[in-house]
Amino acid sequence: MKKGLVKFKLLATAVLVILIMAGGWPLWQHRHYQVKIILGPGVTEVKKLSDYFPAIEDSLADTRIYILQGKEPGGRALIMGNTHANEPEGLLSVLIMIEKAVVEKGTLYLIPYFNHSGGLNTRPGEGYPLYFSIPTAWGKKTFRMGNRDASPLDQWPDPDVYIHYPEKQMLSYLDIRNTNRTWPGRKNGLPMEQVTYAAMELLRRDQVDLAIDLHGAETMFPVTNCIVAPEKSIRLATLASLTVKSMEGFENHVEPSPVKFRGLSHREIGDYSDTLPFLLESPMPFLDQPTGPKTEKLFLTGQDDFLLSLAKKKKLFVPYDESGWPLEKRIGQHLSVSLEIIRQFSKKSPDRAIIIQNIPRYRDIVQHSVGYYFQNPAEVEPGKIILD
Amino acid sequence: MIYQTIIISAVLVIAYTLAQWRKLSVEISLFLATLAGALAGAIFTTPPLAEIPRHLVEGSFTYLDVILVFFTATLFITIIQESGGINFAVRQTVVGFARFRFLALFLLMIIVLIPGALTGAGSVSLLVVGAPVALALKGLGVDENKIPAILFILAGLAAAAPPVNIWAMILCAGTAIPYVGFELPLGIPVLLLGTATILILGRQKGKKTELNEFLSKIEIVPGMNWWRLLLPFVVFFGLVIAYRLWPFSFPILGLPLEFIIASLAAYLISPVKINLIKVASSTVSKLLPLLSIMVIVGMLQQIMAASGVKGLISYSVLIIPIGLLFCLLPIIIPFSEGILTYGGAAIIGIPLVWYLNSLGYHATIIIAALSLLWPLGDGLPPTALIGRLSLIVSDYEGSYWSSIKKAWLPWAMITVVAILMIIFSSRLSFLVIG
């Protein structure tokens, strides 16, 4: 080999190694970044999903469950965030509940990182920012931006096609790492099937009455800004939808859960347990394909010129103007609708009522911002902080 | 913001054009265009300069799974080739079916369709059976210039064929439409168009080939027989089918490991000694341009998303008036595949399906029709994945375009069928069963 060629190859290799290190280091840091979760006055116990299914103990499929038990016995509700970790509205809503909620009657189970592995993953090819920060009075609180699916580092290989258990419906191979396609889960299945199996065990064993799965959805997606509910939950969903519209002034229509589309929480939880499931979708412009750069600002404000232009051409499924669809509205909706579902259930079943105080509603969040509800970890006693 | 993304798009295109003008390879040209796009984006901090290395590294992983399948499948077929299996298969097929030419062509079409239909990848069809089928076509007197075109179209149809169609699955996952009822809307056009392709391109014999002369050119390895040839394929398809038959008890191996296991079977029963290291090394060398394209397209997609160019493409499609959109879909859809491979389905396909569905078109039929158009883009630059593989497995030494342009008539037929399916999707909804 010519000397010049050898030199060129060595130089190219050196550049490549530097590029891999410079590009790989932030990805390693992202996977190991931890958020300080502050235990509010209502948190009575912190368990793990593996307490209901020990096979996932010490794995990245396991995740924490924050339990808020009231003084009076009553019904039980589970609320899940980060089923899709690139839709962190759910995570932030659940974290506000962990910090603020006080349960007077019944029990509230809160899972902020339902697909824990997905929260440690990134989305190659989509150009997402690695983090987003929420401004607060004491500084910024920073979170990881995750992926829709679990990381291949935690569950691999994928099959060439995913066959859903137990219905045998064929789905995209990627969906075997999507915890909103693996319900009702499989005891001896892959880690994400075990996550949903463990959650089903929780629902069945603790006789949970309500399960609410918090998501974000594209503005161009017909199933957005809505509550998805199967037949057994649809009456409560409709009452909640009508109430938030009349009392709080925002739309959140009801979509029926399709019977033929398997693996989703709103379908399988209802079919395989006595729990009433609901899936909440708030409009998230960041997820839309026709948007400008995928930046932290787009995630926080939901403002985008392409979407604005498409809205004028009536191609979106939600009202959209220059103000975009800010995080405050999205989280406010999730909190108000969740509370309203629980309130309607409690009215209908007084012996299983769940009474919760101190959770801000839509107007509070829009007025004060999301960051207003996060405490400064520096001012909290260390025993009340969990790194997650 | 719109002007900003237009400027970045222009920089990308100019950088690619300049690199091609300087006669750099497609891979290097695309990489330089990606870098230029990233730097242009950094002027507007989309992405910030310091984040460019992370975006490049992250983007390079976008198609890692596809790359692993390409490598292991090619290793598998190279071992079969080295053991003398391909020559044996060709000789037996040509000798056995030479008198029933149409039947032979039809059987070869089915052989190409099966691996792609089972895995959703036309590349797997070509990598597994492309080389023996190409040789068999030569043996049946098909014009050598038309063989890559036949393989290209059939491999594309194989990828679209049910039960596994990756474009449809991506669209179903992204649009929350169940992946059910695609058997007839995909199966019927694939079989009809495949038969038409093999008749149009394979019916006329090329230069007259004496059967004995052709057979004398095929070297036969002593000891090769049907069971030595078929066992590795039985192992591979056995593993693929076993998961479908017993999805909850059979372990998930993934296509790369299934190909490796089948390769080991082929290696162990080969009648000749095979140097595995040499074969693996030559496989990497043969595939390097293809694999590097996949790595770089991933990087390009990442930079396009981070800079807003990806959104601009999607937006541009959605603002086209509906009548004009139907006229432009035969161009837009294949080119999106040529540039972005499966990324095109997500960027353009998902909003397009929602948009057309809101106008009353039937979503399942739209998805089926679009996924007939996407494989055509696998013959278009800059990636031209299936087109280039067709030439490789056919051992064709002519220019790329001289061969692929022979597919113009089947290409046009597929396009017309797909567009008619979209326009009359509501009337065709009876095909959606399940």
Image: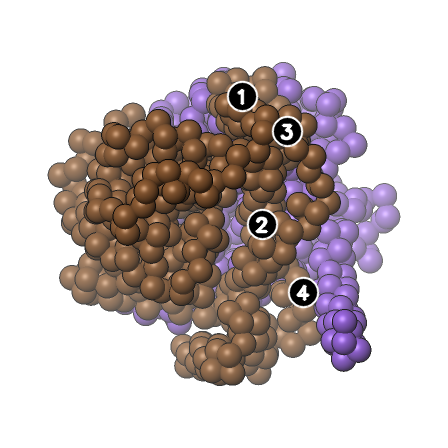
Chain colours: A purple, B brown
Instruction: Say left or right for A80 vs B211.
Output: right
Q: Quadrant of residue B46?
A: bottom right
Amino acid type of the residue tagged 1 in the rendering:
Trp
Front position in the image: B111 or B258: B111
Vertical relation: B179 (above or below) B393 = above
- Name the residue beneath numbered marker 1: B227
Amino acid type of the residue tagged 4 in the rendering:
Arg
- Tell me how far mark 3 sits from mark 2, CA to CA: 30 Å
- Tell me how far mark 3 sits from mark 1, CA to CA: 12 Å
* Of labels 3 and 1, the one closer to you: 3
* Residue in the image at 51% along x and 79% along y: B23
Mark 4: secondary structure:
helix
- Name the residue beneath numbered marker 4: B54
Mark 3: secondary structure:
loop
- State the image coordinates of residue B145 (x, y, percent, origin top left): 33, 56
- Tags 3 and 4 on a common chain: yes
- Tell me how far mark 4 sits from mark 2, CA to CA: 20 Å
Mark 1: secondary structure:
helix
- Tell me how far mark 3 sits from mark 4, CA to CA: 48 Å
Q: Where's the N terminus of chain B, which quadrant?
A: bottom left
Is residue B73 at all visible to an observer of this figure? yes
